[in-house]
Amino acid sequence: MHSLGAEVHYHEMINCIENEQTRQTRFVWFHLTSFLAHAGMISKYISPIRPNGIKRERMALLKEKLSVSGASEVLTRNARDNAEHFDERIDNWVRDDAGSIMEIVLDSRSGYNYLIRDETRIKRVLLQEELIFISENRDGTKFELELKPLYDEVKRIGQNATEWLENSSPVHFIYPQ
């Protein structure tokens, strides 16, 4: 379910940034945040915080059945933390009396480099040409996340999950297509 949700929102985000009417609207951020939240849920299933007991068993089983390596894009916590801890960045901006906060879709890195200043806070920046999402960590440092490799990994995991559920799962599901 989360792989499908991530795929749908990723494509909708792409559609929004490719359309001049929607490129600078909240719909871009809605779809990007939804994509990251779905990827984050997959990450939680595969790599829970403080795995013990049944969590450790689930983690090992899912990594094996879904062929998730230790270098998987879905295991990095940047996407997950960004979606789940947005409130902490708001706290930083309020506490630090942030002057300018950037939220924009830019064609390329050159536009970003032109606009960015040391004192500028980054809420959300999307570099369309490279499909790179830039935001802040909890401590105010900037991070960059390449979206295409994360999308590709989420899609691959979803395909593996579907195949395993249809062909190898010991559980029989009754559900609509």
Image: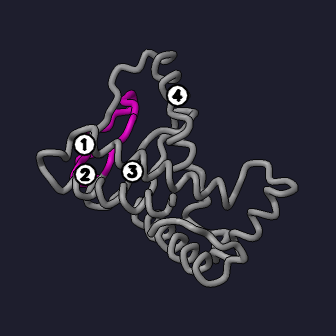
Tell me, yes or no, whether the highlighted magenta stretch contains residue 118.
yes
Q: CA distance from mark 4 to mark 3?
A: 18 Å
Residue drawn at the location 61% of the way across and 75% of the way down: 165
Question: What amino acid is found at the position of numbered circle 2 in the picture?
Answer: Ser
Q: Amino acid at mark 3?
A: Phe
Residue 170 found in image quarter: bottom right
Residue underneath mark 1: 114
> What label does residue 110 carry, if any?
2
Rendered position, 104 above or below 58? above
Q: Earlier in the sequence, mark 3 or mark 2?
A: 2
The residues bearing labels 4 and 2 have C-alpha atoms spaced at a distance of 29 Å
Look at label 1 and name its amino acid.
Tyr
**Element type where label 2 sits in the image:** helix
Residue 53 locus on image (x, y percent):
87, 56
Residue depicted at 44% across the width and 64% down the height: 151
Relative image position of residue 38 (x, y in whole percent): 50, 53
Give the structural element (helix, strand or loop) at label 3.
strand
Tag 3 residue: 133
Whether tag 2 and tag 1 are in contact, CB under 8 A, the answer is: yes
- For label 1, the crowd category at 10 Å Cα-Cα, with few meaning under 14, some 14 to 19 and many 20 or more, is few
**Disc 3 versus disc 1: distance between alpha carbons?**
17 Å
Instruction: Indicate yes or no whether the magenta region holds residue 98.
Output: no
Task: Pick the residue in front: 164 or 156.
Answer: 164
